[in-house]
Amino acid sequence: MKIPEKIKIGGHEIKIERVNTKDIDSAGEFNGFYDVIRLRIDHDSVESCVAECFLHEIIEAIKMKNNLAIDHTHLTVLSEGLFQVMRDNKLNFSSEEVK
């Protein structure tokens, strides 16, 4: 998956940073004060794990920006489930016509 340098969520521009293991304790994190998603990407990172983590942090940002009451366990199940459905079914939500 090609991860962009920034995305927009709820009218806010969110910067995407790729960091090494020494710079972050988890696979990813969202900082709402600085509007940044940080993803841990190393030379041996598994692509599917990084892609799912990116989706997870997007949902974290939506949750925080909208003050949603979703606990982390449920958010993790949601991100894993959405990732699986999107990846296995090759879903693309672009405006191109579906054939």
Image (tube, rainbow, N blue to C red):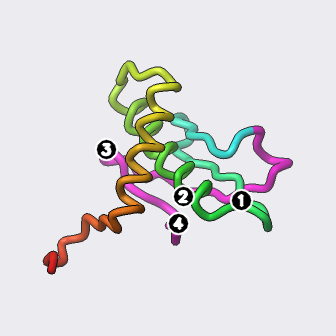
Identify the image quadrant of residue 43.
bottom right
- Percent position of residue 70, x then y: 41, 22
- Depth-wise, is mark 1 or mark 2 nearer the camera? 2
Would you name the residue on which mark 4 appears? 3
Spatial CA distance of label 2 from label 3 is 21 Å
Would you name the residue on which mark 1 appears? 41
Nearest to the observer: residue 24 or residue 70: 70
- Percent position of residue 56, x then y: 50, 43
Type of amino acid at the residue the image marks with label 1 = Ile
- Depth-wise, is mark 3 or mark 1 nearer the camera? 1
Nearest to the observer: residue 2 or residue 37: 2
Type of amino acid at the residue the image marks with label 4 = Ile
Q: Which residue shows up at 35% across the image and 24% down it?
A: 68
Query: Along the polypeptide, which appears first: circle 4 or circle 2?
Result: 4
Secondary structure beneath disc 1? loop
Spatial CA distance of label 3 from label 4 is 19 Å
For residue 10: magenta?
yes
Residue 10 shown left or right of residue 76 in the figure: left
- Depth-wise, is mark 3 or mark 4 nearer the camera? 4
Q: Residues within 10 Å of mark 2 (few under 14, many from 20)?
A: some
Secondary structure beneath disc 3? loop
Q: Which residues are magenta?
A: 1-25
Spatial CA distance of label 1 from label 2 is 10 Å
Would you name the residue on which mark 3 appears? 10
Type of amino acid at the residue the image marks with label 3 = Gly
Q: Is residue 45 above or below residue 67?
A: below
Query: Along the polypeptide, which appears first: circle 3 or circle 4?
Result: 4
Spatial CA distance of label 1 from label 4 is 11 Å
In the image, farthest residue toward the bottom? 99
Query: Along the polypeptide, which appears first: circle 2 or circle 3?
Result: 3
Contact between labelled residues 2 and 4, with CB atoms less than 8 Å apart:
yes
Secondary structure beneath disc 2? helix
